[in-house]
Image: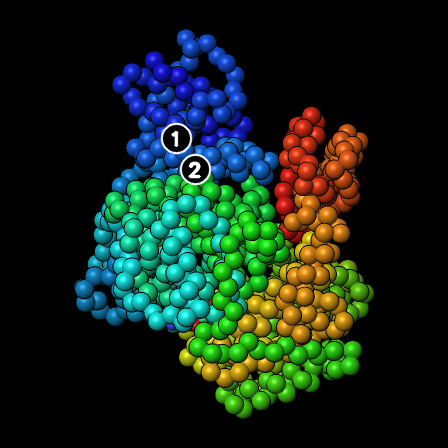
Amino acid sequence: MNRVRLLVLNAALGALDYTVPDGVQAPPGTVVIAPLGPRTVTGIVWDDGRLPGREIEASKLRPIREVVPVPPLAAPLRRLVEWTADYYCANLASVARMVLASGGALGGPTTTTEYRLTDAEPAGRLTAQRKQALERLMGEQGTVRELSAAAGVSEGVLRGMVGAGLIEPVQVAIDRPYPRADADHDQPDLSPDQSRVAGELVEAVRARSFAPILLDGVTGSGKTETYFEPVAEAIRLGRQVLVLLPEIALTENFLTRFEARFGASPVVWHSSLRSTERRRAWRAIARGADKDGAQVIVGARSALFLPYADLGLIVVDEAHEISFKQDEGVRYNARDVSVMRARFEDIPVVLASATPALESLHMASTGTYRKLDLPSRYGGAELPPIKLVDLRMEKPAQGQWLSAPIIEGLKARLEAGEQSLLFLNRRGYAPLTLCRNCGHRFKCPNCSAWLVEHRLSARLACHHCGLETRPPEKCPECGEADCLVACGPGVERIADEVAALFPDARVAIATSDTLGSPDRAAQFIAQAESGAIDVIVGTQLVTKGFHFPELTLVGIVDADLGLEGGDLRAAERTYQQVAQVAGRAGRGEKAGEVLLQTRHPDAPVIEALANGDRDAFYEAETEARRDAGAPPFGRWAAIILSSENEREAREAANRLGDSRPHLEDVTILGPAPAPLALLRGRYRYRFLVNARRSADLQGVLREWIERQDFAPGVRVGVDIDPYSFV
Ligand code: ADP
Ligand code: ZN
């Protein structure tokens, strides 16, 4: 009888020991089902000596029940799980759960039922709903739920149509292979710069060893075309590629280009896949490219922890994006973990960006990362100049937000038949609503935040907890009717302002509210490309990835907005956002122009943007970080304690504060109420920890926090390398 220690996928249980019956193979990495009391648990056989557990006499151990028929998780992935848990002070089981992302991947049925239209002629007259379904479902196949969404009719209507023989069920094998990508399907002609960089990247793939590479290319330089070459090389070698993208709205654009280059779609991975798609992708990823499995996987950050059979390359596109940082559960940064994964797998990793994170540039300057540059736009387009509009001099009219220069710019573009983009990183109509009569402000009952008015959907919404209510007819405080006034602008209000100024302009709002699904994003892109939109008003969603050749004006409504709030890297974030959104202008043959409204034209970051002097900005920011002991020179961690009971949260925070370690190289600030002192009904207190590089930050935190006994209602969250701090 062989004895094994399991990493059980239940954070409360930790590691448990079992025996393996004779004749059963269960090397480290094997996924097994084991009995626990009257139930069973899923676990992963872990390497000897790497998991602390209780030593129990062999005779008391129970045998595992069964080995799950999936390939054992390879050692590099097991090391990654350990590293992630260790570095982010997270629970090993929670990290391991990300690997086995879908319980469904491990077992369950192998076929599923989908539905599609039949050829049958409808007998008699059709109801309007059935007619609509017949029109919209042409060529579609999916579950009843998916078809209901695609057709815009209820599931009941579709079931009725199944009964009437208009829709039929089909059995499909869940694990059927994906269409194969062809490395040489349609090779583009690369510019000399692109060829040089692509050549180096291809070499790195051939070398089959760890190489972190920063691909620093200006907006419109063709980073995607360039990194497709090493992707092609990996496909030729029969190895897998993971491309991480920050935002699902970007995927559609990427998929189109990928298909054009490789003749087939990549395998897509994100959190809203349905369970059969998840299972299919997971198993294809675990099979490997050469065994009819997945070749190229495009995914959101969670794709980083999947069990690739033979990974040959990782690309992180838009690597500066903060959406790579997960702020719940295991709080990890997919950009940083991707470098670790590449290291454990011994493969190259490419971080692509026009505005790299200061941390990444620092790694390049110290020689830890190799830096490859694409200094100019593809096809000879020029980067647009950024002109400042000083809002103290150029005051917009009362209750309006666009200054005369932007209005003139819009007018000129409309007359020339060109597109404009107005950027404001605020969803909804107005960030604050009050009662004209008594001054009552509409606040979220669960969060310390104002409710944001969304006129398109006629709702007041909390952007933190998702609460939505209908705007009341009367003020709940004073009872006055029709008394609500909007304060400040959101994108919807800017769109109204444009519509009032230019009644004939075709205005589109681009935010996660309007482009939330891949379908809607694709629709928006198609419209913008065909010239059916004159003015786009958008949030940070439009700062990246889009390429509209007719877009020649970008107006930044409020460049100062990013400098406020709880962002620990406010100046850098502002720089990146403005540079990215500015990069949408003048990508085609016509030159672009960027107008930036600000009340602080002298702020260093605004000056650097106006002068187009990226190096000066990064140098100044680097010095500021060095002085503050901020990353990359020192390190930060945040601790948030929360409870539904205010007193319980405060007392826990105070007690933790009282037992703080006093160390030379670690400074602990707090406790203080978090800026979002109430979030989703939980009261929050925080500490900010600043450590020198010499300190064992994680060790200090673990030792400090694990000594405490917290009341059961108290949650403690540790955030290593935090971005937002609210
Ligand atoms: P970036 O990501 O660097 O901002 P993109 O990869 O979006 O730039 O490229 C900008 C545009 O130029 C895209 O429409 C892309 O298809 C086009 N492009 C870039 N390189 C080439 C090339 N070698 N051949 C043809 N088109 C290219
Ligand atoms: Zn809320």
Residue 434 percent across, percent down from the top left: 74, 65
Q: Residue furthest bottom?
A: 415
Residue 29: image tag: 1
In-image side of 621 versus 412 (left or right): right
Residue 710 percent across, percent down from the top left: 69, 29
* Residue that badge 2 annotates: 77
In-image side of 452 versus 112 (left or right): right
Residue 29: quadrant of the picture: top left
The residue lying toward the viewer, choosing from 500 and 5, is 5
The residue lying toward the viewer, choosing from 250 and 111, is 250
Q: Residue at x 53, y 78 (%)?
A: 382
- Disc 2 crowd, CA 10 A, few/some/many (<14, 14-19, 20+): many
Verify CB contact (< 8 Å) between mark 2 and mark 1. Answer: yes
Residue 65: image tag: none
What amino acid is at disc 1?
A: Gly
Q: Residue at x 78, y 78 (%)?
A: 392
